[in-house]
Image (tube, helix red, strand yellow):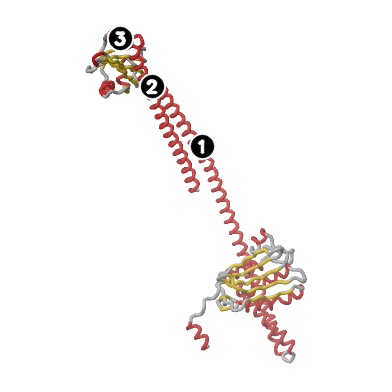
Amino acid sequence: MKTEVTRTTLWMAGMAGIVAVVAGLAAWDAERESAAALGQFAERGVTLSRALAAVIARPAQVAGGPLAEADLLARLHTVERPRALALLVHRPGEDFLRATNGTMVRSAPVAEALARGGASARIPRDEAAVFGLPARTALAGIARIDGPAGGGLDIVVVASAEHERDREIRARRRLVLSVLLAAGLVLVLGGLAMRNQRKELVLERELALADLARGRDERLQRASKAAVMGTLAMGVAHEISTPLGVIFARAEQMLPKVSGDERLAAGVAAILAQTDRIKQVMRGLLGLARGDVPSAERIEPRAVVDQAVALVEHRFDQAGVRLHRAIAPELPAVMGDPRLLEHAVVNLLLNACDACQPGDEVIVRADRAAEEIRLAVEDPGAGISAADRERALEPFFTTKARGEGTGLGLAIAREIVASHRGRLEFLPRQPRGTLAMIFLPPAVPAAPAERSADALA
């Protein structure tokens, strides 16, 4: 959110910078054009002064006599224009100019131009009134009329640049107005952009809060289901413990009576072993429901897979589904409760078997995936959709028909794997099928002292 605001601010600053650069270039160009216009105006004044000098001096040159100053001023008066053009005469050696009405006028810029023999001079606006011109910048053009014996007069044409300066002022005003309009446009667009962005940020915030609330509700729902599952597991364990104890006791009583029959003895021994296994699995599941840490034993991945396969082989035979093992050699051991890990793999195998058709083949693997141990079950069944894959680990969620599944198998498997610091993942196979994977961290190698103690034992 802060990044978006900063981006908008930088955009507005950049636009303001562009407007400032354009305004500066426009002002520089206007100043350059103004200077060029004043230069051209000064050239016209010089040209006018030279033309007047040539025209006025010609009658005197024809007569061959000196030029009378009064006659010269009278001729210049006919050319003079009030508030626009003033004509003056200067005699060498004098520090003033003589106007056509006979008055004496002093001007430092004109005097400086005459002293250095210049052809033009720029007169500031505060001195323009001396020549009877408006308070605008004026330009003076200077030309000399040569007389006999080195004598002569300087004709000074002073013209007001009032119209040029007014045009310059109007141009500057247009420039300022353009800059203000551009800046206003930038501010308006920036304000609209920030307003829209503010609405977007508010909407994003509301969506984020809604997502948080939805996620919190989902977590509460999952926690509630987990609590229900724990309560159910404890209730089921309590209800099963009594008949399970009866089965175990009756089997122990039968064992001496069938000792002479090898087949019956093996069957009773199997009943005792599986009854004990059920008790151990139930004890482990109750521990998970209570939040207990599972027992920490060093377990070979091959042993987990072999024991899980032995428990479900009869189900695969009944369904007509082949079961293939692919176990990598020399896998590191993992730490945990072997009965719980076997139960997690059994759940994955049973789900794979239920998803297959007769003649299909399920592959159970044990290998390494980077720094972890992977136990994977791969089936060519109908597969699982993306939506169901996200909910497959939720308690009581099942895609099976009513009465064929409880929706607890994968949820229990996930809790078992999580308690062993691992994770359970599902991936779709191409073109169909599912790959279920359990990732477990390898066991830390035993210290030398521990290995020596184990060897002595």
Question: Which residue is labeled 3 in the image?
Answer: 60
Front one among 58 and 446: 58
Q: Amino acid at mark 1?
A: Leu
**Outermost residue toward the bottom in this view:** 260
Res 263 quadrant in image: bottom right
Whichever of labels 1 and 2 marks the residue nearer the N terminus, that label is 2
Front one among 181 and 291: 181
Q: Amino acid at mark 3?
A: Ala
- Give the class, few, some or many, for how many residues have Cα within 10 Å of label 2's Cα (few <14, many ≥20): many
Q: Position of residue 252 (x, y in %)?
A: 68, 85
Question: Which residue is labeled 1 in the image?
Answer: 189
Label 1 element class: helix
Label 3 to label 1: alpha-carbon separation: 73 Å
**What residue lies at 50% left-to-right and 38% top-to-bottom?**
190
Label 1 to label 2: alpha-carbon separation: 43 Å
Label 2 element class: helix
Image depth: mark 1 or mark 2 in front: 2
